Image (spheres, helix red, strand yellow):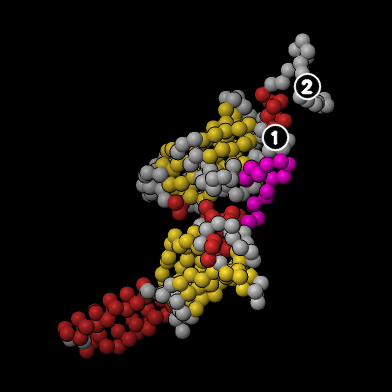
Amino acid sequence: MAFTSGLFNSINGDRRYNAPWFASYFATFIGNGVFPNPSTGMQVIAGDGMQTVIKAGKAWINGYYAVNDDDYIMQHDIADGVLKRIDRIVLRLDFSLRELIPQLKKGAFASNPVAPTLQRDADAYEIALADVLINNGAISITQANITDLRLNAQLCGIVTGLVNQVDTTTIFNQYQSWFEEMTGEKLQEYDTWFSVHQQEFLDWFENIKDILDGDVAGNLLLLIEQNQRDIRTLIKNKTNVVVAAANWLLNSEGNRYEYVITDADITTDSVVDVNIQLDYLDYARMLLSACNSSNGAVTLYASSLPDADLVVDYRITRQVI
């Protein structure tokens, strides 16, 4: 392999630089991925029906540059009646077409589908923006069906500047694992509680059903409906709650910052799970994982003062003692 250098003035055409040379030059100090500002850059969101939308943004692959200045619509094929699939939305650097373009890679139908692999060879180089689950019988795509891959450095990554590329894969995987673990744990607790009390009710009803007359049966129906309403109050979801940067207070004793969210639905018997919305994760690095609930409030903790307002969602689960 020849030793190369540049840039130098050309004399009689002896120093000519083509597009691949410039791409190689830029690739030495600009890493692959999407630009992090704004946080929605190249984000894939749900569209109408079987459509997804790539938001405006910029990207860089192997020294080649691409700009999307408006919503870019991707049309997904119809779902199968029995099997699922996972479509992958990528940015593709195609050397034969001389283009860096978005592409929808349709997944194979299966009971447990996997996303299509990325092509990275002499013909093309792809980075993945999102995986889209197409459920069997689906007639539309929701945001819950879309897995954002932009922070996964192995599949996409964030362009950060000179020399070093920030590896966000571990953070991405840790967040996904924590979310799935917490969601599964709370659902299991609810299922356990419901199955126990449902069986208690069935046993009680079996003992008295032969002595019920019409009026008592009507009253019993009212009690059942009230019980169902009570069950629905066990779990409450709160969304789009603003955590203002100006309202954090320093706790000098604990050497940490604290923020109190007031909410009358929270009690000392509540378990409160607070999730930072994806668009605000970059500003939430200083947040600590612990939070503390009390009557009428939940307290968040941070190791340093956040730089900007955050938007959070949280779930209140009332424990049954």
Residue 224: x percent and y percent?
Answer: 28, 79
Image coordinates for residue 149, horizontal then vertical, percent: 56, 48
Q: Residues within 10 Å of mark 2 (few under 14, many from 20)?
A: few
Question: What residue did someone put label 1 on?
Answer: 27
166 or 260, which is in the foreground?
Answer: 260
Query: Looking at the image, which residue is at 54% across and 45% down?
Result: 38
- The residue sitting at 32% across, 75% down in the picture is 229
| 101 is higher (above) or lower (below) than 319 | above
* Front in this rendered view, residue 10 or 94: 10
> Could you tell me residue 82's position as x and y percent?
41, 50
Q: Amino acid at mark 2?
A: Phe
Q: Given the current orientation, which residue lies at the most extreme top position?
A: 12
> Which of pointers 1 and 2 indicates the residue nearer the eye?
2
Vertical order, 194 against 282 (above or below): below
Q: Nearer the viewer, residue 304 or 125?
A: 304
Q: Which residues are magenta?
A: 157-171
Q: Which mark is residue 8?
A: 2
